[in-house]
Image (tube, rainbow, N blue to C red):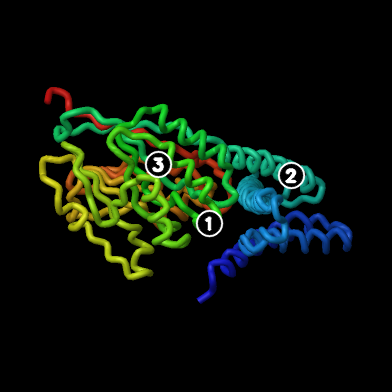
Amino acid sequence: MLSWSVMASMVGCTITMYLFVRFVLLVKLGLFLTITLLFILLLIGCVQPLSSYAFENVFGKFYPLYRYGIYFLFIGCVILAILTIFVDIFWLIANKTGLIPIAPLAKEYLPKVNTFLVASALILTVYALYEGTKVPAIKEINITSDKVAENKKIVLLTDIHIHRVINPEKVKKTIEKVNALNPDIILLAGDIVDDSKNKISDITNLLNDLKAKQGIYFVSGNHEFYAGYHDSLVTLQKLGFKSLENYGVALDDIYIAGIPDWRTAQRIGLIISLNAALKNSTPQQFKILLSHTPVNLGKENKVDLIVSGHTHGGQIFPFHVLSWIQNQYLSGLYNLENDTKLYVSRGAGQWGPQMRLFAPSEITLINLTKTKGE
């Protein structure tokens, strides 16, 4: 089976070779420029292996800038390819229907169309970089229940993806924004840690400033497994956070349970047990389940609210479609069986390119209130 790096390079090179044909060969540039652009686009298509941490030794302190740069070029190519396909299909249909009499690739108009496409892609790529590096906005949702005796402010924080090239200032300001909400409970729904503990200890220690009146609770995501499951859990536990891996805690009228990431736990032989997580709960309690990957337990739903992340809301358009197909859910609040609700956060950070397009990051504030009249 092909490795992820090889498959990513194949997809990347397919995209950049399409651009080579569309923007270089069809324009008929000189031989030297054509060969040069072919080489550059092939390199950009290999972004996954080129972004490897192995290059940290080559670029030293400039490695973060290098990594941001190659991802910027690659995502720019992806956006340019998508825009080009959309425009060319529209132009082709318009030409066939007589709305636009000029042929789609008419020589006299192609340079102008290409200039427009490149400029538009550049603007969208810069915007995507801004969206990915800015501090997440607050996304507020309201949930009512007759099981709740007192109103609670619960902050859901997921997919921070702390790695060696993340900007510590973004993490600091995210923490400040969470604390300003004065939450009763903070829930960390996985993919908080995304690198070797020795490479990110200074940044993960910033999480020690998170404050919640009734505690901070977490479960693993798939990237905790990739970074080292045991080390990741120990790192978060040393910060005073409570692990809810197949476990639950009662906070008066609220019961918070958690399970490991169900898609990756089986790779290390870790059992997932919802029954173990809920065994100390009572029917009268409002039950919240932390599951990094969105999960619908169907008729087995025994909780009131499931909170998840993982999807990043698609992160970069048009990957929204692929994320939705893979996970069944993209982002937002869903109603499931047995009156269970599922909330999928777009997350506070991102994997791979520190960029987002039409999938803004978020810090989720859940206002859990008692039903009126109760």
Q: CA distance from mark 2 to mark 3?
A: 43 Å
58 to the left or right of 242: right
Mark 3: amino acid:
Leu
Q: Which residue is mark 2?
A: 113
Query: Callout 1: few (<14), some (14-19), or many (20+) C-alpha neighbours within 10 Å?
Result: few
Left/right placement of residue 73 relative to residue 355 reads right
Q: Are marks 2 and 3 in contact (CB under 8 Å)?
A: no
Residue 273 as seen in the image, left or right of residue 361: left
Q: Which label number is shown at residue 157?
A: 3
Query: Judging from the image, what secondary structure is the residue with disc 1 in?
Result: helix
Whether residue 108 is visible here, answered yes or no, is yes
Residue 299 drawn above or below residue 7: above
- Which badge, 1 or 2, comes first in the chain's sequence? 2
Residue type at tag 1 = Asn
Q: Position of residue 328 (x, y in %)?
A: 36, 53
In the rendered image, the vertical position of residue 180 relative to residue 342, given as above or below? above
Dot in front, 2 or 3? 3
In depth, the one of 143 and 319 nearer the eye is: 143
1 or 3: tag closer to the N-terminus? 3
Nearer the observer: mark 1 or 3; the answer is 1
The three-letter code of the residue at mark 2 reads: Val
Tags 1 and 2 touching, CB below 8 Å: no
Residue under circle 1?
198
Say how many tags the image has.
3
Where residue 117 sits, quadrant-wise, is top right
Nearer to me, 300 or 370: 370
Disc nearest the viewer among 1 and 2: 1
